[in-house]
Amino acid sequence: MPPAYLYLQPEQHRWLQLTQIPGLGPVTLKQLWQRFGSAEAILLASAHDLTELGLRRSIIDLLGRLNPLTVRDPAVAAIDAWLTEPDHHLLTLDDPLYPDALQQIADPPPLLYLVGDAALLSVPQIALVGSRNASAQGLENGYSYGRYLSEHGLVPTSGLALGIDATAHTGGLDGLGLTVAVLGTGVDRIYPARHRHLAQRIIAQGGVLVSELALGTAPLAQNFPKRNRIISGLSLGVVVVEAALKSGSLITARQALEQGREVFALPGSIHNPLSKGCHSLIRQGALLVDSAEQILQELAPQLPATGLLDVAAGGGDSEPLDQPLDALSPLEQRLLQATGYEATSLDRVVLRSGLPIAQVQAQLLSLELQGWVLAVPGGYQRAPR
């Protein structure tokens, strides 16, 4: 008799068994699914048909010996128990709720473990990625772009990592309240641990945590680059907010290009090593953007026609990004000009302004309280307006 699972469906069980066969990765499994139409049909396929598709003899032999509905696997039973929670889902490649955008990439995950509303994965998304050790300005950009794009109909998608990822998620939560987090661990293992509260907030506000990795999978280094293809695959485009030359964010950007997605990059100071990855992408053809509106304008043809997207067509009453300097005194304006958008030491501000250090410190404090400058490691920098 087949094993009795309360929530796990037979087709989900078959997909679970297929993913355990060595040599059957996402690319091959998609090809098999396109040829045969279901996991059950793959398991029932003849050795001749499988050989014609180029499968190795060892894989064909393993497929021939599989009968996934006759053995009760403890690991599968654990998944069945996990599925008892109402917001827990296991999507297979042929599930109606599996997002079309991800299904179209060359190597879609055969399984998606998901906590939250599965339908959110099919809503238009924008990936925002960047450095874990981001600058103050980078963090501000991650948050402000995430919030703005959320408020205009795009769901921010990122990887729940430190730095830019976390600020993008938070921006989405403070916008329309929705965000998608793609994990490099099992969906039941939040990494880093300090983001447990953020993960809880994502679920509480109607967002999604998703992973292709088995429940309980620990944070292993090799899994994080693989999950980046899911971040880009779910999204209409990828925004690289801030990244060094050797960065996982650049991997995501390359995968996005391979998937036919738009790639956007924010320029930064030529002296900031965390801007060099963005500058490299721009030289290679990524779209340079210095406002979130530009992203909406580029993606407008792919977005549903809703009032939220009026700005993409040049409408709306959004505030200008640059505020007038008239409210500042001539002395404050002088100090602002002496402070760069990268971290600028106090000594350099004094040198550039030609003012006494005590006066500079007092005026910088005033500018900081007004939101014009930020105190950062290494000195001060102008705040994005």
Image (cartoon, rainbow, N blue to C red):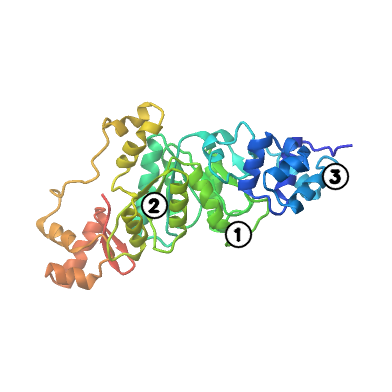
Q: Looking at the picture, which amino acid does disc 2 mark? A: Val
Residue at horizontal 52 percent and vertical 34 percent from the top: 122
Label 2 – label 1 distance at C-alpha = 23 Å
- In the rendering, which numbered label is found on residue 300? none
| Picture coordinates of residue 65, whole percent (x, y) | 83, 47
The residue singled out by tag 3 in the image is 71
Label 1 – label 3 distance at C-alpha = 30 Å
Q: Looking at the picture, which amino acid does disc 1 mark? A: Pro
Residue at horizontal 16 percent and vertical 60 percent from the top: 337
Name the residue nearer the viewer: 328 or 251. Answer: 251
User: Is label 2 in a helix, a strand or a loop?
Assistant: strand
Specify few, some or many for label 3: CA neighbours under 10 Å numbering under 14, 14-19, or 20 or more: few
User: Is label 3 in a helix, a strand or a loop?
Assistant: loop
| Picture coordinates of residue 88, whole percent (x, y) | 65, 40
Q: Residue furthest right?
A: 1
The residue singled out by tag 1 in the image is 219
Residue 336: in sight, yes or no?
yes
Which quadrant would the N terminus be assigned to in this image?
top right
- In the rendering, which numbered label is found on residue 240? 2
